[in-house]
Every structure is written in C-alpha cells, then in structure tokens.
C-alpha cells in the first residue's frame, strides 16, 4: 500500500509539473504572431497565439468599390489562414509537451 501512495505522489508531482509547463507554453504562444495572406498578398492578417487579430493590411490596389465583396472574401481568407496557423502550432506544441497523451483540460 505504501508503494502505491508513493507512486500516486510521484504521479501528482509529474502532473503539476506538466500543468506548469503547459501554462508557460500557453503564455509564450500568446506572445507569438501568426500571419495569413490572401489574393497573392493583397490582404495580410496577423493574429496572436491567443487568436486575437493584431494587424490587418490591405494593399491599396485591392480596393475597388466595384469589387467590395471580393475584398471581404480576401480579408476572411487571410484572417482564417492566420488563425489556422496559430491553432495548428498551439496543438502541435501542446501535444509535444504532453507526449500526445491527450489529457483533458490541458489544451
């Protein structure tokens, strides 16, 4: 029985360490920037690892009142590409930290 409690204590310490590492990684990811482009670079979006839009650049040549709908689509595509890059990086790095264990509440 004593051996079981020792194993449990070690497991809890390991889980706490992993939780601290994940919190540190989430903080670090939040400071990083991810970029998405659309229309051959006519629209560029930059998001944080916390998935907040930080920057949106539109090439003046892409602004045509007759084609507002196209510009809207390019903006959506660029923002979504940047958000996807942030999400994929976050998932990849979190899985690397957890060893792919898929622990609940750790993402």
Image (cartoon, helix red, strand yellow):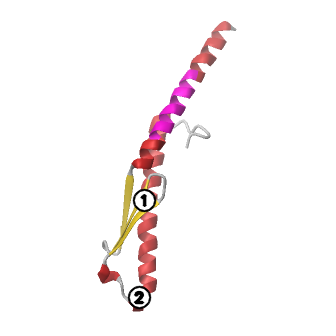
Q: Residue at x 62, y 39 (%)?
A: 104
Quadrant position of residue 33: bottom left
Q: Position of residue 2 (x, y in %)?
A: 67, 7
Residue 27: % across, % down: 46, 43
The numbered mark, 1 or 2, whose residue comes first in the sequence reads: 1
Q: Which mark is residue 67?
A: 2
Q: Residue furthest top?
A: 2
Is residue 41 among what the camera can see? yes
In the image, the segment drawn in magenta is 13-25
The quarter of the image holding the C terminus is top right
Residue 99 visible to an observer of this rendering = no
Residue at the location (63% across, 9% down)? 3
Q: Kindly identify which residue carries mark 1.
A: 47
Give the residue displayed 41% in from the left and 92% down from the top. 66
Main SS, magenta residues:
helix
Q: How many marks?
A: 2
**Cα–Cα span, label 1 and label 2:** 25 Å
**Image quarter in which the N terminus is found:** top right
Decide if residue 61 is on the left or right side of residue 55: left
Identify which residue is drawn at 31% across, 77% down. Answer: 59
Crowding around mark 1 (Cα neighbors within 10 Å: few <14, some 14 to 19, many 20+) is: many
Q: Secondary structure at mark 1?
A: strand
Q: Is residue 37 above or below residue 1?
A: below
Which quadrant would residue 8 be assigned to in this image? top right
Q: In the displayed structure, would residue 90 be above or below residue 6?
A: below
Q: Is residue 15 magenta?
A: yes
Provide residue 19's location: percent of width, then percent of height: 54, 33
Q: Position of residue 96 (x, y in %)?
A: 44, 38
The magenta stretch spans residue 17: yes
The residue most toward the right is 1
Q: Secondary structure at mark 2?
A: helix
């Amino acid at each position: 029985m004593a051996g079981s409690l020792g194993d449990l204590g070690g497991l809890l310490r390991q889980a706490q360490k992993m939780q601290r590492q994940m919190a540190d990684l989430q903080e670090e990811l939040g400071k990083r920037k991810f970029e998405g482009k659309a229309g051959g670079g006519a629209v560029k979006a930059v998001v944080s690892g916390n998935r907040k839009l930080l920057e949106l650049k539109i090439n003046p040549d892409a602004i045509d009142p007759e084609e507002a709908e196209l510009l809207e689509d390019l903006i959506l595509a660029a923002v979504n590409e940047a958000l996807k890059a942030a999400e994929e990086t976050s998932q990849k790095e979190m899985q690397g930290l957890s060893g792919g264990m898929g622990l609940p509440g750790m993402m």
